[in-house]
Amino acid sequence: MKKISGKLVYFFGALGGLLFGYDTGVISGAILFIETDMKLTPFAQGIVVSAILFGAIMGAAMIGYFADRFGRKKMVLISAFIFAAGAIASALSPNAEILIFSRIILGVAVGGASALVPLYLAEMAPAKSRGTLSTLNQLMITVGILSAYIVNLIFADAGLWQVMLGFAAIPAIILFFGTLLLPESPRWLVCKGNADEAFNILKLLGNARGAKKEISEIKAACAKDSAGFSELFARWVRPALIVGVGLAIFQQLIGCNTVIYYAPTIFASVGLGNSSAILSTVGIGVVNVLVTIIALIIMDKFDRKKMLITGSIGMTLSLLTLGVFSNGASSAYLVLAACAAYIVFFALTWGPIMWIMIGEVFPLKIRGIGVGVSSVANWTANLGVALMFPWLLSKIGSQIFIIFAAMAVLSILFVKFKVIETRGRSLESIEKSLRTASSKK
Ligand code: BGC
């Protein structure tokens, strides 16, 4: 086994998140130029933006099975290869059809990475730092989005959308070679009967003393791992399923990606030129990264439910401001400020917490399937919103933000009545209270 430091394991382990962020964020700026070059209707524009999400649904649905069968590391390598190939193919697309096809293929890697990264990190991380490490995934996503915005800005004057899309091949190649150095997940190795190698990896990650105990715990967990998909719908698991899928869907229905993907379009509609619209978008990306760093620091200090509700209230107010003021005649600065406030509340709360909590709420033996199903729900809702947004914007204008505000209000009720608190509790205690609650009914 090659020697690699723990920090590098977490860095390369989370790097897939950066590609997820870059590939989904880059389209926001590129679409302004693709639209003109390929003469796209608003609907076709929606399809080009959303193609990656179609692929992501497929990728997220398939990855759990393949990762269990062939290992996490091989799947990250394959995703990195698809990331690189998809980026190059998108950049070279001569027409909308090939572009859409390439972006769907790229999406398979994005969806795969969205489930693989939290899975791999959780399996590598010591239990006590799992929360922070999960937020590391979100940090990579936001850095990826920001990098995309910056690349867009650099190539905006020349209108070179091909470079914007193709640039993603660089981190994809770094991911591929970085992953070659990564150890396989010890959990997967133990389940495949390779406890010796797993032991060495745990030692390498700094857990020399507890490694033996951890291996026997993993062995016990593997023994329980035989439950299938149907267990997800068992009565006692249902509250967890509702939390996982509900959070995943609401994260999208509150409209986060209308700001992330369409910020330049929104800014252009209140009178900013294409380049300054993209520049303001970079500002949004910076706020997203900086606030995610704060989220990483405070994540284990405040209850998740309280944070989610605070986030929803802040986003409701920002969305109402956007709904009332983002029509052509309004002040561009007010719209910018409302978008920034929205991102602050999202990045601090719903951005990271959704991905953290889908990893926490499911019982161990169906955790992989649960995360996969929640992730598919997230991408499907993401697709629905992205597909409808340009069309609805052209029909009802800025009132669309009022609809998202209503969703944000509903999300408060959902969190208050359906979500269970997970902060500071061991995964076993969460699992135990699911069982106890169902036996009381
Ligand atoms: C969401 C993405 C979103 C990103 C923005 C993630 O948590 O799942 O849909 O684009 O945050 O930072």
Image (spheres, rainbow, N blue to C red):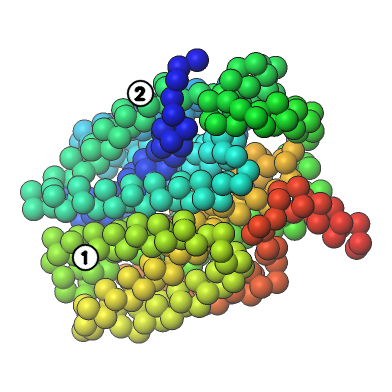
- Identify which amino acid the numbered label 1 is placed on: Ser
- Identify which amino acid the numbered label 2 is placed on: Phe
Front in this rendered view, residue 204 or 103:
204
Q: Residue at x 47, y 58 (%)?
A: 297
Q: Name the residue under label 2.
A: 177
Q: Residue furthest right?
A: 440
Residue 233's disc is: none
Q: Mark 1 points at which residue?
A: 280
Q: Residues within 10 Å of mark 2 (few under 14, many from 20)?
A: some
Q: Can residue 123 be seen in this view?
A: yes
Q: In this view, does 402 lie above or below 340?
A: below
Q: Quadrant of residue 262?
A: bottom left
- Secondary structure found at label 1: helix
Give the x, y percent position of residue 121: 53, 38
Residue 190 horizontal side relative to residue 116, left or right: right
Give the x, y percent position of residue 267: 23, 69
Q: Which residue is drawn at 65% across and 39% down?
A: 368
Q: Is residue 373 visible?
A: no
Give the x, y percent position of residue 74: 50, 22
Q: Is residue 75 above or below residue 130?
A: above
Residue 56 horizontal side relative to residue 429, left or right: left
Q: Badges 2 and 1: C-beta atoms under 8 Å apart?
A: no
Q: Which of marks 2 and 1 is nearer the N terminus?
A: 2
Give the x, y percent position of residue 317: 43, 81
Image quadrant where one finds the C terminus: bottom right
- Secondary structure found at label 2: helix
Front in this rendered view, residue 205 or 101:
205
Q: Is residue 30 above or below residue 81?
A: below
- Ligand 1 shown in quarter: bottom left
